[in-house]
Image (cartoon, coloured by chain):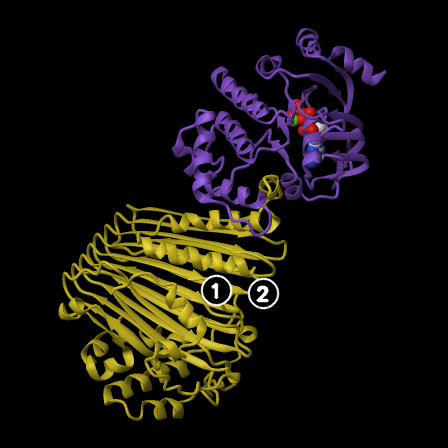
Amino acid sequence: MPMDTTTMDPEGVTETLNREKVQAYSGPEPEWLKERRSHAWEVYEKTPMPTTRLEEWRYTDLKKKLDLDGLAWPEVTECADDFDACPDGLRDAMEADRAAAGHVWGIDGLVFHIDLEEDLQQKGVVLTSTRRAVDSHPDLLKQYLATETLPPESGKFEALNASFWTDGILLYVPSGVRLDLPIRVTRWVSQTGVALFSRTLVIAEPGSQVSLVDEILSDDLESQTLVSDAVEVVAKDGAQVQYVSLQRLGHGAFYQSSQRTLAQRDSTLDTLNVSMGASTSRVDLNAQLLGPGANSDMLGLYFGDDTQHFDHNTSQDHVAPNTSSDLLYKGALDNESRSVFRGIIRVHPKGQKTDAYQTNRNLLLSDNARADSLPNLEIQADDVRCSHGATVGQLDAESRFYLMSRGLTREQAERLVVMGFLGEVLSRLPLGGVVEKVTNVIEEKLRQV
Amino acid sequence: MSDAPVLQIRNLHAKVAEEGTEILHGLDLDIPAGEVHAIMGPNGSGKSTLAKVIAGHPEYEVTEGTVTFHGEDILEMEPDERSQAGLFLAFQYPVEIPGVSIANFMRTAKQAHLPEGEELDLFDFQDELLDRMKLLDMDPTFAERPVNDGFSGGEKKRNEILQMAMLKPSMALMDETDSGLDIDALQVVAHGVNALTEEDSQMGVLLITHYQRLLNYIKPDVVHVMVDGKIVKTGGPEVALELEEEGYADYREFETA
Ligand SMILES: Nc1ncnc2c1ncn2[C@@H]1O[C@H](COP(=O)(O)OP(=O)(O)OP(=O)(O)O)[C@@H](O)[C@H]1O
Ligand SMILES: [Mg+2]
């Protein structure tokens, strides 16, 4: 019998997402970028849509959770750079912000405002939108955007994002320049039923120091909106970088974020992912420890209610000898919410003297909430120290009674326990202002539950 | 002194809510305002169950009888409402609340005890907390430690009395607060409790204990003996001394008779 050689139809091609749209979008762009997008789209077509048969997608069924066919392009709002004209939710989030060395804000995938301290500009720090950078800093984009860090070949969503990104943040810190205060990004989503693609690129040259706090939020969205982020962070030798993501989207959002961090020799590259919002939130985080002495602290917090679904898929790649990483993800789950944590520590053959840790802890606040935790190790070097652990616990009746016997209502008791539980992660955050911000974000969510 | 007892219990029957074993088999108890009562009884006689039922633990179900507090039926009240009404239970086994500092916990509890719309004055609170910690010979840094997390047995008990001193109940149930305390700590805790009863001469106290030792420092007006879910004897401080001598043998016979 002859083999059936017909190739499968490409998956995930819709009236909104297709080759013609890529071409149309990149029409006015320079040749190199056109080629990049076109290549990314080819990869997208060739890559099958992830299914639950794949280990990494076993608990997140895209067939049920994401309706690509229902997504349209957002209308382009040419909103002026006018703070007072911003939606309330965006203004509130920005006003709650503490001192920063620079601010970025945007709506529906486009950046509308950027400011940066004068003396940092003079020192050569670049803070701009990726859209503007196509003209102003093409060399940085050519070198770093969707190339070695997060190429389209990384996966279906990574290829889709590389095909369609509309805007994002470029942060470049020259050698030896240190920012005392963080850069704060606030992104608002207002349109419903649309697909939004954005990229964040952070390049920290040797010996530099920078922290980026990236907050995305919205009200509840009537019909499903896909919010896709691709985050690439590079810490060169001896650089210290902190990337913080605060996801506070409303119900109706399908949030998808792919993050990869490259830590070179003696650098510190820490991340914090705070997942509070969206109906479905999938975060893929890969930390690469590429140079001896590199270190990554990877923190995560999530808090679900209703039928929210969180999926954190992390990996720690120890490629060079003498590197360390320490991951702690903690989540509380109420009502019928659900979380999946899948994490792997990979020690490559040259990764001798690796120190790698991974911990995931879950607190269930309701009988109908669920948490699956799947920690994993893959070790190809013999002189390493690695450990992993996972727990899923219930808020026990005894703790609740104890607190209530002191006069706290049931809700107050639960809030206090959750705050205490998640607080362990906050206590490990080095930056004061960020702790305050994240604490407020959690308290805000606790008030809603 | 007011006529009606602060706490009045009549024919109290209570069982474990889930499995249904009855533990309290028709118990009567009166604690008038300003009096200190002690309950002694063998392990498993139901002393902690009684204390938890009074405080409203959801694990137990009252099947018969009444519990009134300041003349009001409290059996339908939630544990937080009972606390706000002035009841306090010092736990035999205090619970650990990781990540929540004593100061934060007490601030939340004090706020919960205020009438709707009233805001806790944080400076007054801070002063009061330091003051109370001093009374109980506690280091001020203790306030920043997570509630009972990693505490020694004695520290946990002291922390219970600190909470009691902060919330100033009109009726305090103390379940084996003396167990796990060394002699010095016992004196400090007793001193704290006595200071509170002096501050509020109307405050009622129910001490659950196995040892006469505590009663040397906190003098009871009345001592009850509890066996198998009932009060089987009530008398003066001499009852505790008798028990110390003779144990519960007589009462056990009484129970099976
Ligand atoms: N939740 C429960 N489920 C099952 N049995 C229980 C429960 N609570 C109490 N009991 C049982 O009821 C009896 C009384 O227990 P309780 O703790 O009240 O005794 P106690 O007098 O405080 O003892 P001790 O002096 O040892 O503290 C015991 O036999 C105990 O095992
Ligand atoms: Mg007991």
Figure quadrant of the C terminus of chain A: bottom right
Mark 2 vs mark 1: in front: 2
Dot 1 amino acid type? Glu
Question: For residue A55, which numbered disc appears in the image?
Answer: 1
The answer to whether the residue bearing label 1 lies less than 8 angstroms from the nearest atom of ligand 1 is no
The residue carrying pointer 2 sits among few (fewer than 14), some (14 to 19) or many (20 or more) residues within 10 Å by Cα, namely some
In front of the other: A193 or A291: A193
Q: What is the spatial separation of the Cα atoms under label 2 and label 1, in whole angstroms?
A: 23 Å
Task: Give the image location of residue B148, x and y in percent.
Answer: 49, 35
Secondary structure beneath label 2: loop
| Residue that badge 2 annotates | A307
Both marks 2 and 1 on one chain: yes
Task: Give the image location of residue A439, x and y in percent.
Answer: 42, 55
Kindly identify which chain the residue marked by label 2 belongs to.
A
In front of the other: A47 or A338: A338
Task: Give the image location of residue A87, x and y in percent.
Answer: 43, 76
Chain letter matching colour yellow: A
Task: Give the image location of residue A261, x and y in percent.
Answer: 30, 63
Dot 2 amino acid type? Thr
Q: Colour of chain B?
A: purple
